[in-house]
Amino acid sequence: MSNPAIETNENTLDRYDRIRPIRWTGEALELLDQRLLPFTVQYLCCDDSDAVAEAIRSLAVRGAPAIGIAAAWGTVLASNGVDAIDGPSAAVALQPAMQRLDEARPTAVNLRWALNRMRRVLEASGADWRARLLAEAAAIASEDLAANRRMGELGAQLIAPGSGVLTHCNTGSLATAGYGTALGVIRAGVALQRIDKVFAGETRPWMQGSRLTVWELQQDGIDATLIADAAASHLMKQGDVDWVIVGADRICANGDVANKIGTYQLAITARFHGKQVMVVAPSSTVDMDTPSGERIDIEERDPGELLGVSGSRTVAEGVQAWNPVFDVTPAALIDAIVTEKGVVLQPDAAKMRVMFDA
Ligand code: MRU
């Protein structure tokens, strides 16, 4: 892998960072409603925590880091109705609302990670618990943005100038506080002139790739070519792709990665065609308590998502469908895991421990 240095500066990277999907107004949480994109750009206003839980469940807000951030703000909203003398009492009062946020989606560990952070702050707070809860939610959001910028730089350095990349699902600003994880690396790689060609898979059935990723890249003026998910092997055989770059919903202690359904087959075809696989995720996605991929709860959504397109049914009545929305890529098929803490090449349990058990 050739790796000549290309100068990085803030302005180069700033060029491609425009979208902010999560806005805290001081009284409510505004979420760029991803169910309506790309044709309607509209923020959904949530003024209580159950509205946030429903927004997470219904994919109005989606993507592992984004749902963690939304849940943190959801906890702040839940605290509006709580009159507690100190943080531990507030934690008891907030528990049912936090539980409902936690149960909104099962696979991405960032949701539980963010709620645990909020809970720990409450446990450590006195009469100032309300201000500290608010500050923690703001910190979770701003740290995510900073992590994405750092991962962008680290990931782009792995890519040789003139490369082609294929991404899956949406891992961009929409899925995070801003900039994105895998899409952040692609933004940085384009800005630093390492990436010449970007391909994005449609990501059936919810179409995160065709509805969100190519729209996001278009907003930033980055050329991207959409492919049907089923075209990935053919594309790699033709040679236009050097790296498959994806995000993650959970990274296990042995380096196995849960991500959007279809990631596993991309990793298999990448290995067959001699292409590399990069997983980009903040350390909040790393779950050292889950030893391997078999232990991950894979969300299965309404089979109805598979039975039609844009609300129109395309499948005969009575046909059954199965709709798991994540899969697990074994560590052995991954060339690099990029986090804001650093890069783990050819991940395994020992390397993961060195990077994340500190
Ligand atoms: O079901 P979704 O759209 O929430 O799934 C999202 C993904 O699988 C992403 O790849 C992952 O959350 C990383 S987002 C930075």
Image (cartoon, rainbow, N blue to C red):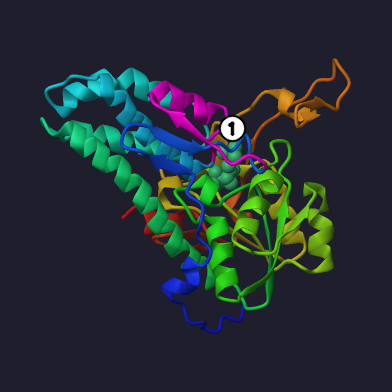
Ligand 1 quarter of the rendering: top right
77 magenta-colored: no
Q: Position of residue 39 (x, y in %)?
A: 67, 42
Residue that carries the numbered disc 1 in the rendered image = 298
- Depth check: give the residue in front, 16 or 245: 16
Whether residue 346 is visible to the viewer of this picture, yes or no, is: no
On screen, residue 174 versus residue 128, left or right, reads right
Helix, strand, or loop for circle 1?
loop
**Outermost residue, right direction?**
316
On screen, residue 176 versus residue 238, left or right, reads left
55 magenta-colored: yes
| Crowding near the residue tagged with mark 1, few <14, some 14–19, many ≥20 C-alpha atoms within 10 Å | many
Q: In the image, is residue 117 above or below residue 146?
A: above
Quarter in which the C terminus is drawn: bottom left
Q: Position of residue 149 (x, y in %)?
A: 44, 62
Q: Which image quarter: residue 68?
A: top left
Q: Position of residue 269 (x, y in %)?
A: 76, 56
